Image: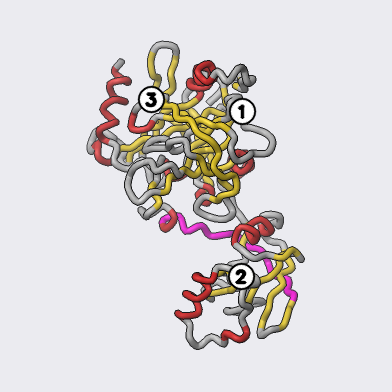
Amino acid sequence: MKILRLLSLMCFSIFVISCATNSNNISVKENKNDLSSIIERVKESIVYIMISELEDPAIDPAKNSACSGAVIENQYIITNYHCIHNQKYIRIFYWDENDWEQHEVSIIGRDPLADLALLEVTDKELPVPFLKFAEGELKTGDEVFAVGHPMGMTWTVTKGILSNTDRFARHPYVKAVQTDAAINKGNSGGPLLNMKGEIVAINSLMISKVNENAGLAISIRADIVKHSVKTMSEHGIVDRGALGIMITPLGDERQRDKILKKNPTVNQKNIPNTLGLLISEDETIPEELKLWDTVVAIGGVPINNGIEFADEMSKYEIGKKVSVTIIRKKRFIQLDVMIKVFEVPVDKMYAKSGAVIP
């Protein structure tokens, strides 16, 4: 009961909250849409994560916060990277028959670009079942529900639909879904589940100008999470390939005009009206490319926006060369460019902004 009182007290100390396993796993067959029975089966696999910027959270409760996490296969807990970024104290709580049990965890993997982190309990096996990832295509309109511990209110359930299945979270490399299931402070890292109790996505952020749920939540898709978990468990960090260029989609007229207005000396006659991605900054451009080149294809596949660019780049290995087709001074040119590691601007990505981190 002492731990329960601690969890209750945390509700009042939370000020910024950016939203494990045995051989059993959870996958509930759809049975008359009995949501209550599904919740009973899955809730023990959703842990409460207490975090603090200090090594001793009792020193200053204002620096404490909390997140949720999902127990998955191999004694792992998946949560959000922003939950553990720059935190010195991380503990998980899970329900063990009659009370909450607290355990230390180690961070075994980080994927800051996808806002994912992989944790492992260090002092015992978790006597709770693990959640499975959903397979198959996600469809707009599918029913989903979120389970988490927002503001210390344990096992809070909200229900909704997939409003869109083709969003991205923080970066075009990271495919995401949009849902109208309410996501609030403390939901971060918790699962978005289908009506079989399978993980559809991991809740990451809500978009709002105020610190309240606004019906627009973004969750990282299960296929992205599964790939990230595999890489984190094997290598500790997830690296993605890049060309080292900053690009502006020419199809986005507002962005195009903004860039060209900042650079009045550019010969606009050499830049296509709507085709491709304009290289708009020159700090890290590889020697084969030049500022104001327009990238129109990667590996022979036409691209017109950041998502298409990220999709094609994800197919190639770091350290290999890829064919890049550009337009330079109205001429089409094909070049072989080395793929290098994408340097994630972690501090910039996780600074406070208009996107509220639940």
Q: Do we see residue 107 in this rendering?
A: no
Q: Nearer the viewer, residue 58 or 334?
A: 334
Label 3 neighbour load within 10 Å: few <14, some 14-19, many 20+: some
- Report the amino acid beneath label 3: Thr
> Mark 2 = which residue?
277
> Mark 3 = which residue?
154
- Report the amino acid beneath label 1: Lys
Q: Residue at x 61, y 77 (%)?
A: 273
| The residue positioned farthest toward the left in the image shown | 59
Q: CA distance from mark 1 to mark 2?
A: 38 Å
Q: Check residue 132 in the rendering and tell me which mark sits there, or answer none.
A: 1
Numbered range of the magenta stretch = 334-347
**Contact flag, marks 1 and 3 (Cβ < 8 Å):** no
Q: Which element type, helix, strand or loop, lies under badge 2?
A: strand
Q: Tell whether 270 sits left or right of 122.
A: right
Q: Nearer the viewer, residue 42 or 163?
A: 163
